[in-house]
Amino acid sequence: MLIIEHLISKALIPEKMLRSFIPVSTDSHFPIQNLPYGAYRTEHGEIHLCSALGDHIIDLFVLDEEGFFDGPELNDQFAFQDSTLNYFMSLGKAAWMEARQTLQHVLSEDTPTLRDSKLLRERVFKKREEIELTMPVQIGDYTDFYSSEQHARNVGSMFRDPENALLPNWKHLPVGYHGRASSIVLSGTSLHRPKGQTIPKDSEQPIFGPSKNLDFELEVGFLTGPGNALGKPIPIDEADDHIFGLVLVNDWSARDIQKWEYQPLGPFLAKNWATSISPWVVTTEALRPFETQAPEQEPQPLPYLEQKKRTTFDIQLEVFLKTEQSETAHKICTTNFKHLYWSMGQQLAHHTITGCNVQPGDLYGSGTISGPTEDSYGSMLELAWKGTKPLKLPSGEERTFLEDGDEVIMTGFAQGEDYRVGFGEVKGKILPPL
Amino acid sequence: MLIIEHLISKALIPEKMLRSFIPVSTDSHFPIQNLPYGAYRTEHGEIHLCSALGDHIIDLFVLDEEGFFDGPELNDQFAFQDSTLNYFMSLGKAAWMEARQTLQHVLSEDTPTLRDSKLLRERVFKKREEIELTMPVQIGDYTDFYSSEQHARNVGSMFRDPENALLPNWKHLPVGYHGRASSIVLSGTSLHRPKGQTIPKDSEQPIFGPSKNLDFELEVGFLTGPGNALGKPIPIDEADDHIFGLVLVNDWSARDIQKWEYQPLGPFLAKNWATSISPWVVTTEALRPFETQAPEQEPQPLPYLEQKKRTTFDIQLEVFLKTEQSETAHKICTTNFKHLYWSMGQQLAHHTITGCNVQPGDLYGSGTISGPTEDSYGSMLELAWKGTKPLKLPSGEERTFLEDGDEVIMTGFAQGEDYRVGFGEVKGKILPPL
């Protein structure tokens, strides 16, 4: 019944014209066109899956229990009765589309079911400011790529040779490495400055102590859906069917620890102490209207990485820094997801080409996203150019790396004609070392 | 009641004198002194946790259900009623000791309860050859270290400079990196040769195809128990309390893929297609009688890596290769766990020093274990010295790396006076590329 009604309304109203009976301001990240997925703690202490609409969250457990998800894919699946999205993510694209259509229909200003039932509305809608969001996904494996050309060039220029900033493999494959999944935390988690080994300049003897070169990395990550069996690569043209949605990622880094430890097997402790993600997973479906041309690739990648359609998403990204002395957060970076050289589809096809299996809930970070201008670099390392150009803040303070008490706030959104599809924010504060 | 009885029997009979009412040959890996943990599929298709004794497995679910685990730590915990060991591992050392004591008591030739009940024995004991073992642990994160000095020297000599084979950081910290957890498979799983990008000699253009330098890596891994909260490192003197047990690990590697991809962020696809582990987890408690002196460390590591007691375990390790043309497996490597420079305690203390949290069921590989002699190297890369010294097999064949149809079988055991504490084996066969 719902589905038929919805198909009619779909035929009449284009998605971008949809309005909900819940008022949503034009600068909200969460209009009816977004409907991201998250999880929250109910007043009874249970974890329920949820979505967002304006200043409210939508309890999906209640909607599921009430039988709203009664389409052919989701009927009797209890997809929103777990405490994480993993099972729903495993169901695949048809189920994801059906859930989106169902939600858009139920929340539409023209659908009376929820609109006109005070009792149901009270059970389904909670004020965002009154609830605590929780980790929406059980992340199995976490992979971090290195897919921003400008970032790779910046780092290569600083630490190697500006003339040969990119290593020979960089334009042939999306360089990546495995990260630590256990220490992925939700936005809002404060983090103690890590301790570790570093090597003083011109010394052969390492010292132990708190990291002095603490940094953020502005990234966007994607979460996989159904995934593949071990031994069966995901062909590049099917990769998008396995990408459920995106999150903002702050891949915190201790640059001085990294410098000493990373040869020959890559970053380890420098990154394993924390990675923060946004509480909202924005679906690829919600981002579809913001598809845009991806950067040209030269040389042409090998056939297993060649995409028929070279598109990406136009997502504006911003980083703010709030020090203990300042009352407001100061914007230190504006960049865009569309700058990434390697697409998510290419990353996933490459990741699985050996037969590696990916699973529902695995996370894949883009790597630091830096744009072409100096104010679009996605890390302190680049913004303050290895400490040589300190950032001057309105409070009169300077920064080359992060200090104790600093809070980093990242945000991201795609701008439509009169609405935004956004991620909210991912934030985290650096506490003194323990 | 059991506990009191047991304390008496413990007082009278030293552990090494214990005998079970189930006969166990002296060369079995599974005497009553071992009692490793695993999981198997019952005739009804359920997964039950189990242990091993001689040629039998012991159904721990049945023993738990029958109330045998009634000591203060395990009573009413249902520790053996899950399909993986994770919950039991989370309970910590006191629970692990109690389970071991309970099992040794119940299986002892002097304890009539099980010995004299045909009905119960039939439910508890299954012939190993008649059942299928399954993955005993849900592995969250997988870390691989690089802790064999001889292996690091061999690789450094081959690819860099024999005079400076070790990188400057190697003797200051246990080098490690994050691996892929999703593709960890149980012994016996056959694996298709992976495809990927490699760079032909003297070319700047990578090619795509099946790996030509397929290798095994002989490793031993440990699995963590309770673990730590994010931000709270595990001090080195407490590290052993978090180590539940050990498994044999074959960390399969595609050397040609690794060579092209690994700069600057470390191995990625070269290793992500499979890691095989033994089905039996041998507890640190069972290995305690085989403690031996660990290698001297010079220079002395920083205080957070300094151990009061520098011991390791004397575990003999062997690798066999069986080609399609040969009827028997041929031993190609004999080495020992005790050669490792960095201990498990040091690895775990280092891993968490930044505050990284470890969880029950996380796996930590030692890195390839190579001894001081040429026949004690733990990989084809080293045994055939980068292809320059092909291995000659009794079948008349030669090998520089693994060929399709090759089966690699690793085994390991600690030798007591008249018993062995062993791991059984971890084996896997290379199938042609798909």
Image: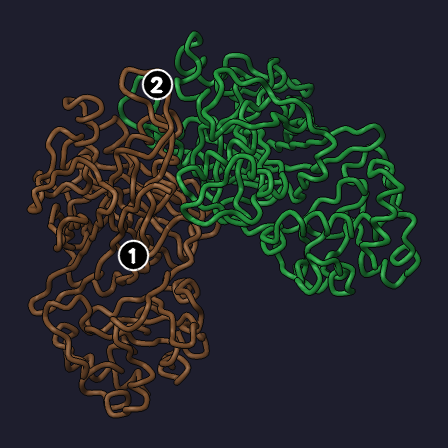
Chain colours: A brown, B green
Query: To which residue does mark 2 refer?
Result: B201
| Residue under numbered circle 1 | A187
Query: The residue tagged with tag 1: helix, strand or loop?
Result: loop
Percent position of residue A379, x then y: 20, 40
Count of labels in the image? 2
Quarter of the image for the N terminus of chain A: give it.
bottom left
Q: Tell me, yes or no, whether dots 2 and 1 are on the same chain.
A: no
| Chain where mark 1 sits | A
Identify whether B272 is placed above or below B42: above
Q: Nearer the viewer, mark 2 or mark 1?
A: 1
Query: Which element type, helix, strand or loop, lies under badge 2?
Result: loop
- Real-space Cα separation, disc 2 to disc 1, in angstroms: 47 Å
Q: Residues within 10 Å of mark 1 (few under 14, many from 20)?
A: many
Q: Is residue B340 above or below residue A335?
A: above
Looking at the image, which residue is at 64% across and 37% down? B426
Compare residues B241 and A260 and report the one nearer the observer.
Answer: B241
Q: Quadrant of residue B123?
A: bottom right
Residue at the (73%, 51%) spot, across then down: B98
Whether residue B212 is visible, yes or no, is: no
The chain carrying label 2 is B
Rendering coords of residue B324 (x, y %)? 64, 31
